Image: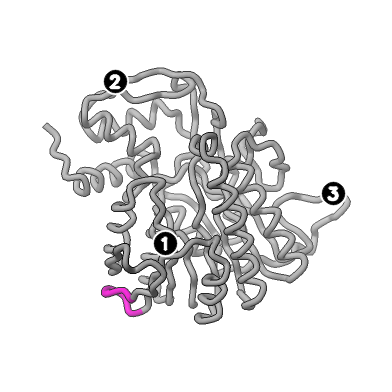
Amino acid sequence: MKVLVTGAAGFIGYHLTERLLKDGHEVVGLDSLNDYYPVELKHDRLRQLGIAIGHEHNGDLLQSSHYTSFQFIQMKLEDREPLQQLFAQFAFDAVVNLAAQAGVRYSITHPYNYIDANIVGFMNILECCRHHNIGHLVYASSSSVYGLNESIPFRPDQPADHPVSLYAASKKANEMMAHVYSHLYKIPTTGLRFFTVYGPWGRPDMALSLFTKAIVENKPIDVFNHGNMERDFTYVGDIVEGVVRVLQHPAKPNPDWDAAHPESDSSSAPYRIYNIGNNAPVKLTEYIEAIENKLGKKAIKNMLPLQPGDVPRTFADVQSLMNDVGYKPTTPVSEGVGHFIDWYLRYYQVHLS
């Protein structure tokens, strides 16, 4: 296939792009390379894909030195006309939209970033898919859409109408916008609610990076909700496997969908929503222990209350994804954390004493 991957310099986008290229697909990667976290990490991910980029390349289509089937362009999804031109140039078979302003806590202090990137940007993606006959749009949603929902495990066929952060609200809005375009224009759209993804090349603002850095430097770590948190931590390799499988199965109308008793994860339109998680919540304290065990060092814990916008527990019911595409996560947290720390020590050139 010829696939557009937005957010290709991001954590999941980088791993997905590499997998698609190794599987023999033709990929165009797009990323704004914003400074939400240090841009050098994004540049280094791109270098792994054969793209050397500098400020002078903004808006240029760059050819990979590692893969003849990979090109990259720096662009914002909010830039409507250049995005339309890109779609017209390449006639993509499918689009995987991972580009977004990420972060629950950051959305408390920078709300407009989420409207620009996650709402306006996604609208532009939908319009491009509409006008250029895209065969399948797969896009990143988030477990955060479940918000105040306390029905555990989270099931995608249940309502998710009470988000507690603007980030979550923007992702729920994406799902609703996608449904409109699936209904009106018959565009197959599949939304994936990611559950706490971690692994090598992970974002430095996420817990695993923050904890590892602090423990290595003998500094305290902030443990929110006094450690009484559970997350469905999901290894990035398992996430990518799920995305690749979904990409090859465009959403179809659900013939059993009942408008009088509507389920949220399917429709009479070619529209699907899936959870994509490890299906096995882990206590935050156990996650920290896995880091400590790998590093051979104990953490200094700074116990704090639950942060605004956070939820105490996430747990993905992935049965529908297993049924439809055979998805089954295989990486235990101890193994995944080990892979991350091996990468972290190499990348940041850390030598444990």
Q: Measured from the top left, where is residue 163 in percent x and y?
A: 65, 37
Q: Nearer the viewer, mark 2 or mark 3?
A: 2
Separation (CA) of disc 1 from disc 2: 35 Å
Neighbour tally class for label 3: few under 14, some 14-19, many 20 plus, Cα within 10 Å = few
Residue ID for mark 2 = 300
Q: Quadrant of residue 219?
A: top left
Amino acid carrying label 2: it is Ile
Q: Does 183 sit left or right of 303 as displayed?
A: right
Residue position marked by numbered label 3 in the rendering: 261
Q: Which span of residues is magenta-colored?
A: 63-68
Residue occupying image coordinates x 25% and y 35%: 294
Neighbourhood count class around disc 2 (C-alpha, 10 Å): few under 14, some 14–19, many 20 upward: some
Residues under labels 1 and 3: Cα distance?
38 Å
Give the residue at mark 1: 8
Closer to the eye: label 1 or 3: 1
- Residue furthest out toward the right: 260
- Image: 114 above or below 106: below
